[in-house]
Amino acid sequence: MVVMRDVAIAKSEFVPDQKAITKVQDFQELPELFEYCSLPQIVQYVKCFTGPNIMSMHTMLINKPPDAGKKTSRHPMHQDLHYFPFRPADRIVCAWTAMERIDRSNGCLVVLPGTHTGELKQHDYPEWEGGVNKMYHGVRDYDPSLPRVHLTMEKGDTVFFHPILIHGSGMNRTAGFRKAISCHYASSDCYYIDVKGTTQENIEKEVIELALKRYGVEEILLKDAWMAKGRLVQGERINL
Ligand SMILES: CCCCCCCCCC(=O)SCCNC(=O)CCNC(=O)[C@H](O)C(C)(C)COP(=O)(O)OP(=O)(O)OC[C@H]1O[C@@H](n2cnc3c(N)ncnc32)[C@H](O)[C@@H]1OP(=O)(O)O
Ligand SMILES: O=C(O)CCC(=O)C(=O)O
């Protein structure tokens, strides 16, 4: 399990540590949370994208904190495929469930409809004055005049979205922590790719640096991190 803190409050001496937590990732070893990934209400839709052999690849309990005044609670516009060294993209889907009412005031999801039919684009850190969270890359060039849809959701509402869809989330202007739970699924028939020489090289480099710093692991590729995180939800584990 990885606990992530908001860059603007991680080092604050005025904010208690647990109040800086912006998400808990990789909860696949925690049975109560992992139950979300096999809920029939979710899986019945997931399998329309993945087919019968379903793997959970990435899990998150997102706890977007009240913004500390630097707008770091925003999540830059991105395509999730940037982080994934497996294909095909059409066999990957994210389920994202609101754990309370979420609207523009507490930083709802923002999507650019139709962009899932495009290509994976170059991602880099956005040049934000107040700083940006580590490993929060943003899509470099997209048409800012494309229509945006803000997803207002009630508690328990779930969206399912494609990994090439350009999306992000806004600033939390409220005093509460905005909570959502999500799982990225893929068909176990998907296959790993080598990201060397692709736009994904920059995220692989960061993951390698993090693995060395945190776990002392020297020889690792992006796909090794994903192989270790993936769990079979239903069907047969084939490639992933
Ligand atoms: C490849 C990542 C997997 C995500 C795949 C997801 C695909 C789905 C779509 C998305 O979610 S897109 C966004 C994907 N990115 C992330 O989810 C970012 C996840 N980030 C983290 O989990 C943590 O921020 C991270 C593990 C990278 C923190 O790493 P560290 O181990 O370096 O943090 P640590 O708590 O040990 O603190 C080390 C230093 O960083 C600082 N720090 C802590 N949190 C930070 C933060 N959020 N940003 C920048 N700096 C941070 C901290 O103050 C400290 O500073 P000093 O070294 O100066 O003492
Ligand atoms: O929950 C959020 O604020 C954004 C989540 C997101 O963009 C993602 O999981 O890819």
Image: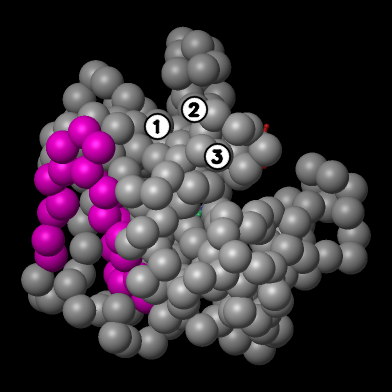
Q: Is residue 192 left or right of residue 69?
A: right
- The residue segment tinted magenta is 148-172
Mark 1: amino acid: Asn
Above or below residue 8? Residue 117 is below
Residue occupying the point 49% across, 27% down? 21
Mark 2–mark 1 Cα distance, whole angstroms, equals 7 Å
Marks 3 & 2, CB-CB < 8 Å contact = no
Label 2: which secondary element: strand
Residue position marked by numbered label 2 in the rendering = 21
> Closest to the observer: 56 or 65?
56
Quadrant of the snapshot with the N terminus: top right
Mark 2: amino acid: Ile
Q: Is residue 18 left or right of residue 73?
A: right
Marks 2 & 1, CB-CB < 8 Å contact = yes
Q: Which mark is residue 34?
A: 3
Q: Tell me residue 196's x, y (percent).
A: 70, 84
Would you say residue 192 sits in the magenta stretch?
A: no
Q: Tell me residue 167's x, y (percent).
A: 29, 62
Q: Which quadrant holds residue 147?
A: bottom left
Residue position marked by numbered label 1 in the rendering = 63
Disc with the residue nearer the chain's start (3 vs 1): 3
> Closest to the observer: 31 or 20?
31
Q: Tell me residue 103's x, y (percent).
A: 14, 40
Neighbor class of circle 2 (other Cα within 10 Å; few <14, some 14-19, many 20+) is many
From where the camera sits, is residue 174 visible?
yes
Q: Nearer the viewer, mark 3 or mark 1?
A: 3
Label 1: which secondary element: strand
Disc with the residue nearer the chain's start (2 vs 1): 2
Q: Is residue 11 left or right of residue 144?
A: right
